[in-house]
C-alpha cells in the first residue's frame, strides 16, 4: 500500500505481532508499523484490466495481510478520511469503504435530525 505497485503478489509468511495503540511510540507515524510495508504493493492495488476472479483473490490475500496488521484501524480511518479511491486499505476495498462512508453519512444525518427534533421539543416545552 505505501510502496509503489510491483508485479509480484506474494504475502509475507511471518505474521506481525499486534502492539496495542497505547504501547506504541506515539511520535512515530502509524504507517511505519504497517505490515503492508513489507509486502508487495501489487497485492493492494489492482492492475489494469484485472479479471474479476483474479481481483477477488488478490483482495482476499490483501485482507489477510491487513488482518494481522497492528495499525489496521489507523489505516482504515486514514483511507476513510482522505478518502482513498483505490486499493485495499485497513482491510477494506474501495467499494467497501464507499459503503462505510455512506452509512456514516446516513447516521450523521439521522443524529442531526434527532437533535433538531429534541431541540424543538425542548423549546416547546
Image (tube, rainbow, N blue to C red):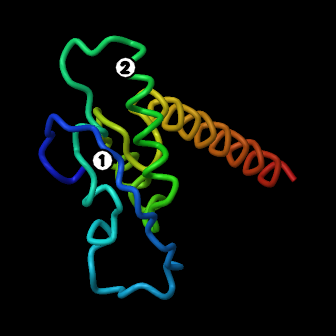
Q: Position of residue 82 (x, y in %)?
A: 30, 47
Label 1 sits on a secondary structure element that is loop
The residue under label 2 is 54
51 or 21, nearer to the observer: 51
Q: Which label is found at residue 17?
A: none
Toward the right, the furthest residue is 125
In three-dimensional space, the C-alpha distance between marks 1 and 2, rounded to whole angstroms, equals: 27 Å
110 or 81, nearer to the observer: 81
Q: Is residue 43 above or below residue 14?
A: above
- Where residue 97 sits, quadrant-wise, is top left
Q: Residue, x 30% and y 38% (percent of image)? A: 43
Number of numbered tags placed on the structure image? 2
Tell me, yes or no, whether the two marked residues, 1 and 2, touch with CB atoms within 8 Å. Answer: no
Mark 1 vs 2, N-terminal side: 2
What crowding class fits label 2: few (fewer than 14 Cα within 10 Å), some (14-19), or many (20 or more)?
A: few
**Which is in the foreground here, disc 1 or disc 2?**
2
The residue under label 1 is 82
Q: Position of residue 58 (x, y in %)?
A: 38, 31
Q: Position of residue 118 (x, y in %)?
A: 77, 49
**Relative to 31, is 92 on the left or the right?**
right
Q: Residue, x 18% and y 18% (percent of image)? A: 48
Q: Is residue 71 above or below residue 11?
A: below
Q: Position of residue 19 (x, y in %)?
A: 49, 78
Q: Residue, x 39% and y 13% (percent of image)? A: 52
Q: Is residue 20 above or below residue 66?
A: below
Q: Is residue 18 above or below residue 22?
A: above
Label 2 sits on a secondary structure element that is helix
Amino acid at each position: 500500500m505505501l510502496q509503489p505497485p510491483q508485479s509480484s503478489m506474494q504475502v509475507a509468511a511471518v505474521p506481525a505481532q499486534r502492539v496495542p495503540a497505547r504501547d506504541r511510540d506515539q511520535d512515530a507515524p502509524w504507517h511505519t508499523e504497517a505490515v503492508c510495508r513489507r509486502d508487495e504493493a501489487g497485492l493492494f492495488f489492482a492492475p489494469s484490466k484485472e479479471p474479476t476472479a483474479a481481483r477477488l483473490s488478490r483482495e482476499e490475500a490483501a485482507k489477510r495481510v491487513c488482518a494481522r496488521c497492528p495499525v489496521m484501524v489507523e489505516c482504515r480511518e486514514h483511507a476513510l478520511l482522505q478518502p482513498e479511491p483505490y486499493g485495499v486499505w485497513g482491510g477494506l476495498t474501495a467499494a467497501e469503504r464507499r459503503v462505510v462512508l455512506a452509512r456514516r453519512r446516513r447516521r450523521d444525518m439521522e443524529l442531526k435530525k434527532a437533535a433538531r427534533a429534541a431541540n424543538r421539543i425542548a423549546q416547546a416545552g
